[in-house]
Image: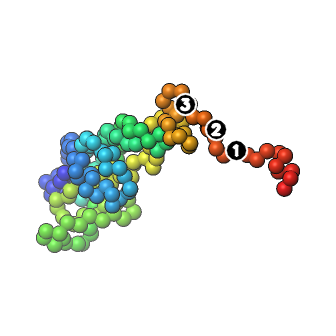
Amino acid sequence: MQIQTQQLRPGQELRFDFKLGVEYIQECLHTQRDVDEHLFSQDVNVHIEAQKISSDIQIKGYFHADLTPVCSRCAETYSQALEKDYFFLLSPYPHRHHSKGVFELEEEDGIYYFSDPMIDIAPLIREHLFLNLPMQYLCSENCQGLCLHCGDNLNVGKHHCKKSPNPIQAPSASKEADV
């Protein structure tokens, strides 16, 4: 999604919605984090409000993604919604002319500096999306995971494993006394 900075007048607000395609998200997904390629099964809905303030451009909005992660405990796939607000401040490089055909956007101290009058904000949204992915996925807070002995999902039905559910046990008092 591109914004033409020269056509946006100071004080003017531009609002629009677009979708980040699954292919676009996945094209750099594995370079950013080790993420399951099936995590994004649908396009991500993005809402943007852009406003020019002097020569700076304030970008705010939210995105909504329907994720299909694999639970870290029980290894089952489930659905999870991810909705986050975002805010960016874009500012032109002071006293810098851009070379024709060269797109430059650099972040420093929370401000993104641009040199091209046409700004593609999709990479900023994608970066914010990656930064807001959970570090660990759990289908529920009380997910019991898998049996350490037989591998059965402990969340499903009654567990019939003959081994102790807790393989790590504290030594008994009598064994400690012998040492």
> SS of the residue at dot 1?
loop
- Residue 105 x/y as whole percent: 26, 64
Instruction: Using the image, tell me which numbered label, if any, was put on residue 169.
Output: 1
Q: Quadrant of residue 84?
A: top left
Q: Residues within 10 Å of mark 3 (few under 14, many from 20)?
A: few
Q: Residue at x 17, y 69 (%)?
A: 102
CB under 8 Å between discs 2 and 3: no
Q: Amino acid at mark 2?
A: Ser
Q: Amino acid at mark 1?
A: Gln
> SS of the residue at dot 2?
loop
Q: Amino acid at mark 3?
A: His
Q: Residues within 10 Å of mark 2 (few under 14, many from 20)?
A: few
In the rendered structure, the answer to whether residue 174 lies left or right of residue 36 reads right
Q: Earlier in the sequence, mark 3 or mark 1?
A: 3
Instruction: Using the image, tell me which numbered label, if any, was put on residue 105.
Output: none
Instruction: Using the image, tell me which numbered label, if any, was put on residue 159.
Output: 3
Q: Quadrant of residue 121?
A: bottom left
Tell me if I can see residue 100 in this picture.
yes
Disc 2 versus disc 1: distance between alpha carbons? Answer: 10 Å
Q: Nearer the viewer, residue 93 or 22?
A: 22
In the displayed orientation, state which residue is furthest to the right.
177
In the displayed orientation, state which residue is furthest to the front.
162
Instruction: Using the image, tell me which numbered label, if any, was put on residue 164.
Output: 2
Q: Earlier in the sequence, mark 2 or mark 3?
A: 3
CB under 8 Å between discs 2 and 1: yes
Q: Residue at x 62, y 38 (%)?
A: 163
